[in-house]
Image (cartoon, rainbow, N blue to C red):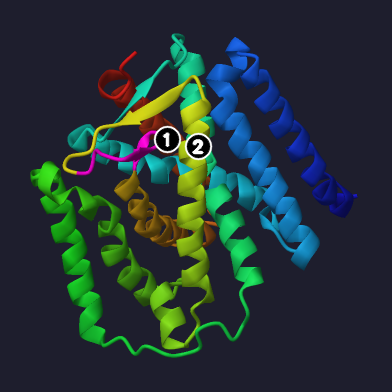
Amino acid sequence: MKERILRLNLYFGLLIFIFSGIFLIFHLPFMKTWFFIFAWWSFILIVDSLNFRKTKTSLLSQSFKDFLFKAFISVFVWLLFELFNLRLRNWTYHSLPLNFVERWLGFFMAFASVIPAMQEISLFFERILSRKFLRFQIKVPPAFHKWSMFLGVISIFLALSWPRIFLPLVWLCFIFFLEPLNYRLKNRTFLEDLERGEWRRLSSWLMTGLITGFLWEIWNFWAGAHWQYSLPYLNFWKVFEMPVLGYLGFLPFALEVFALSELLDAGYRKLEKRMLLKSLIFVLLLLFYAGCFYLIDTFSVVD
């Protein structure tokens, strides 16, 4: 039964996506507001089904509970960048629902799609690439780990202190800091992959960054509820709403999402049987989400 549902998700996703597009073309007010969310979640169903059909494995096939965790913690990951944006002022939101309950639900559903979508896409590309793809090793000296973590901290400081100059460091700081940390904690890292001569995961996540970046921008461009960019010294030659050079930022962003999700996944596994502590963290995260949504409303929502 489960296998049949996973296969049928391809058709469910396609139907939802097609009808969402049709309703958007006919300017249905509800769909103008919610198109971005319908597009992403139908896309996740499609790619998950394709992954399952090809390899018998996908996020939904492995564990629905873990899938919900990835969606829930995805909100936390994206809100880290929203907090950066309060200082950087790189994007603003427009034409969102006036009712804050509906607006906050939209925030949650949109942000919750980030990690599931990117992991599904990376899994799709990783299965396509040959196991012999770029088989050569890179030995990383131990000193590199300490300097990389230090560079991550400095990057955060520079980006927050002089945002107009050091804006790109926001999309690099978590790589510098978390890759060595994950390596020490024995979580999955690109550093470990490269030491083993395995380049497929890194390559698939870089391709994932480009694909998700393009889809974010094209679906945002056609949606009624959308965001707009204002980037210092890069705000030219726009493709949809994003300046063309801004698409390069999606490459390291994908690596940051991987590093953050690996760290959070490892923490979740360690709390597997500590239900009281997990419940407390869940409540604290909900409060954190509400606080961040309020800040987005106050500083990032324009009209």
Q: Residue 161's quadrant in the figure? A: top left
Q: Which residue in the protein does label 2 denote? A: 218
Query: Would residue 167 be visible to someone looking at this image?
Result: yes
**Does residue 122 lie above or below 285 as drawn?**
below
- Which of the labelled discs sits on residue 240, or is there none? 1
In x, y percent, where is residue 275?
A: 55, 48
Instruction: Pinpoint residue 61: horizontal percent, then vertical percent.
Output: 74, 56
Residue occupying the point 46% across, 54% down: 210
Q: Residues within 10 Å of mark 2 (few under 14, many from 20)?
A: some
- What residue is drawn where x is 34% and y is 46%? 244
- Where are the magenta residues, as a range? 234-243
| SS at mark 1 in the image | loop
Amino acid at pointer 2:
Ile
Residue shown at 66%/49% (left/top)?
Answer: 65
Which of marks 1 and 2 precedes in the sequence?
2
CB of mark 2 within 8 Å of CB of mark 1? yes
**199 left or right of 8 in image:** left
